[in-house]
Amino acid sequence: MRKVAFRLIPFICIGYVINSLDRYNISIAALTMNKDLGFTASVYGLAAGAYFWSYVLCQVPANLMLRKLGARAWLSIIMGVWGLISASTSLVTGQTSFVAVRFLLGIAEAGYFPGVTYFMMCWFPARYRGRMMGWFFAASAISSVIGAPLSANLLRLDGSLGLAGWQWIFLIEGLPAVILALFGYTLLRNRPAEAPWLSPAERTWLQDRLDIEASSKVTHGKALLPSILNPQIIVLTIAFLFTLYGVYAISFFLPLIIKGLGLSNLAVGYVTALPSLCAAIGMILISRSSDRTGERFWHVLCPVTIGGLAVLVAAFSLNDVYVAMAAFCVAVAGLTSTLPVFWNLPTAYFGAATAAAGIGAINTIGNMSGYLAPQMTGLLHDWSGGYVVPLLVAAALALSAPVLITVSGIRRYVRHPHAAINVH
């Protein structure tokens, strides 16, 4: 398993770093782009959220394409296309073109996260999957640790070759995905049985273990529509949506919030990286703890509760930069640390035949918050004249998530991963 992890995890994590960078770099670009293009907070929120219109619509079709073409080809195609579209964001001239290019970016990126989640199920038995997902989710946070300072420094290229600083952000940060796509077809394999870098004994052991785990899933997960429409899954999906609302509200507006505290653009870039660094550490620690103990339920509930409370503290601390940033660090770490372990809850319910589409369906509905959060945050900011009300809404939704997860009753389906059948 160590050999498998070293072979696959770096590539898909680097891909997610670039994926998140190309998704969220508009938050730093907005420091000057909004003024250049005449965007209000609500207009910026509309354009930022346009990404998720297509993202949520294309999740399930993209994952069905993954099943048809295989991860080796499909994930590589996705990377190349989203890199080109992200770079083309440098050409936008107003609200209409910005909304259009973000819509296209959502189509291109829609299949990556659910595709990798399914890919993990094809390669890692349940005992190892939590920590692998922890590293994968941490890559998203790491992208902000790297990307926010990088983007802030690229803003300083304003005027070079006749381009604005925010245009340089999109041009330079979109190209790595295209380069990475060229390596995907060589490095990836669809399943262990196809891996030439594993010995025959290793391939047989791992593939047999995965096949037996898949066949041992409870039978109620074999029909896709009844599984998705099950009240427990619906409630769990709403909890996921509420959690992501808090994540997206902070992700798209944190640089603007920090800028309002009196910092320079360059300082904003470096300070914005701090919550993401805390999130990366939190996701790795929580997922490793969950795998080590075999406990899933409380490893989801506790972080999201702490995160929601921290958003509440941040809402009332915007006049103190130190308290506010400490609260944002705890909030981002808490809300994001719950996500790697969260996927053990629905995947314990779905059968092998419905896992890919089921994951895509939950992620599709959950990521509707990607549109709702920036749009509502922008509208509430323009209505209230500040970020207190938007943050209170995010805190209320985040604190509703642990209540919904508890009442869903999903806990009884989460089996101890260490009890998996031993295949020898």
Image: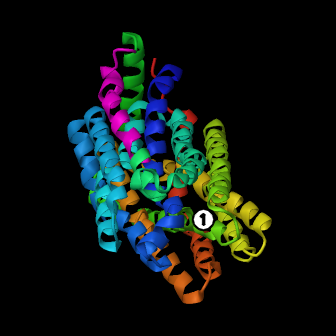
User: In the visual, does 45 lie left or right of 101?
Assistant: right
Q: Identify whether 298 is placed above or below 92.
A: above
**Residue 272 seen:** yes
Q: Which residues are magenta?
A: 173-197
Does the magenta portion include 193?
Answer: yes
Type of the residue with mark 1: Leu
**How far across and how far down the image is residue 59, in percent?**
31, 55
Does the magenta portion include 155?
Answer: no
Question: Helix, strand, or loop for circle 1?
Answer: helix
| Colouring of the image | rainbow
**How far across and how far down the image is residue 367, in percent?**
42, 63
Q: Nearer the viewer, residue 159 or 38?
A: 159
Hey, which residue is sitting farthest bottom in the picture?
383
Residue at left offset 59%, top offset 63%: 255
Residue at left offset 33%, top offset 35%: 181
Residue at left offset 52%, top offset 76%: 377
Q: Identify whether 237 is placed above or below 65.
A: below
Disc 1: which residue: 254
**How far across and how far down the image is residue 322, in percent?**
79, 64
Q: Nearer the viewer, residue 129 or 406?
A: 129
